[in-house]
Image (tube, rainbow, N blue to C red):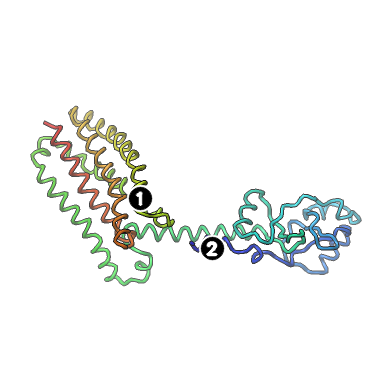
Amino acid sequence: MPPSEEHLRRSVLEFADSEYPHLLEGETVESALARLRATGFKSRAIYFYVVNAEGHLVGVVPARRMLLNSPDTPVARIMERRVVTLPKTATLEDACELFILHRLLAVPVVDEEKRLIGVVEATVYSDEMVRLADASEENWNEELFQLIGFTLAEIRRGSGFSIFQRRFVLLLSNLAGGLICAVLAGMFRDLLNRAVALALFMPVVLALAESVSIQTLTLVLDRQQSGVFSGKRVLAFLQRELPTGILLGLALGALVGGFAAAWDRQPLLFPTIAAGITLGLLIATVIGTIVPLLFWLAQRDARPSAGPVVLALTDVAALTTYLLAGLLIMP
């Protein structure tokens, strides 16, 4: 269970103020205020909860009413009898949900017989939201660094040389991918000499494919982090993602191909670039799904290394399909 979930499942009694000031049903406003002043309470009371002689919660009085009513007014006359409460078995998560739903500044906690045990103030909710936001930012930063091949611990504690070693090793996969792409471009030199516009749009094709592969990788790693990860689930995810990859390829391919054909006045650029981008994005979707699965099957953590590997493989695969499409379609 993630630490945030474990914290939210703590008992609400840990956060309830058992010394929160309360009123007695038989008191008047004057006697109640005199008693409260004598106790010297330190809570920032927005509501005063009213109990009977047996300690059962019977109502609530907003502090404003205590100030605006005459001293001899009975507390029972100005109290609201309908009170939103939390059972003593509730969790911190239950309390936070109640604050969101009812927008209250405090909520009383009662036992099975409706006896007042304590009061949870809205500051507990606001403090929890701040804590979760800080934790989420920390986790997000950790996941972001891992996606590009690092952990925060390595960045914070590592020496300059150790960070250099780590980054150098990871960049070797990108370097290998770049060199292979350069060799591929050389193999298709005649095609690129005949259709220079194909070379001009190669960065666009690679950028789109890389974006799709990283998006897919992020979604897969999120499922792995949530604990719902298995080979069968990943393949089912791939089956759902493939139509998305095809639609993205068709839409973006049509936009880029249409622009290229109109700009360079070569109609065949449209089907060439459209086909290359569609196939490239389809393959990028597969790579972004399969690579973390292979790491998982090898019982290796995919987060620190999968990003650079996915990008390198995607570049090679996308450029290959793009140039093959040009070879088949362009004269």
Locate residue 218 relative to residue 194 in the image: left or right. right
Locate residue 237 relative to residue 50 in the image: left or right. left
Q: Are marks 1 and 2 in contact (CB under 8 Å)?
A: no
- Residue 52 drawn at (x, y percent): 84, 60
Q: Measuring 27% from the left and 66% from the top, which residue is drawn there?
A: 166
- Mark earlier in primary sequence (1, 2): 2
- In this rendered view, identify the residue nearer to me: 62 or 239: 239
Which residue is tagged 2? Answer: 6
Q: Badge 2 local density, few (<14 within 10 Å), some, or many (20+)?
A: few
Q: Badge 1 local density, few (<14 within 10 Å), some, or many (20+)?
A: some
Residue projecting furthest to the left = 190
- In this rendered view, identify the residue nearer to me: 129 or 224: 224
- Circle 1 or circle 2, nearest the eye: 1
Identify which amino acid the numbered label 1 is placed on.
Answer: Val
For residue 15, above or below residue 212: below
Q: Measuring 42% from the left and 54% from the top, which residue is drawn there?
A: 228
Mark 2 element type:
helix
Q: Measuring 43% from the left and 57% from the top, which residue is drawn there?
A: 227
Locate residue 186 relative to residue 213 in the image: left or right. left
How far apart are labels 1 and 2 at the CA level?
A: 27 Å
Q: Name which quarter of the figure residue 28 lies in.
A: bottom right
Which residue is tagged 1? Answer: 234
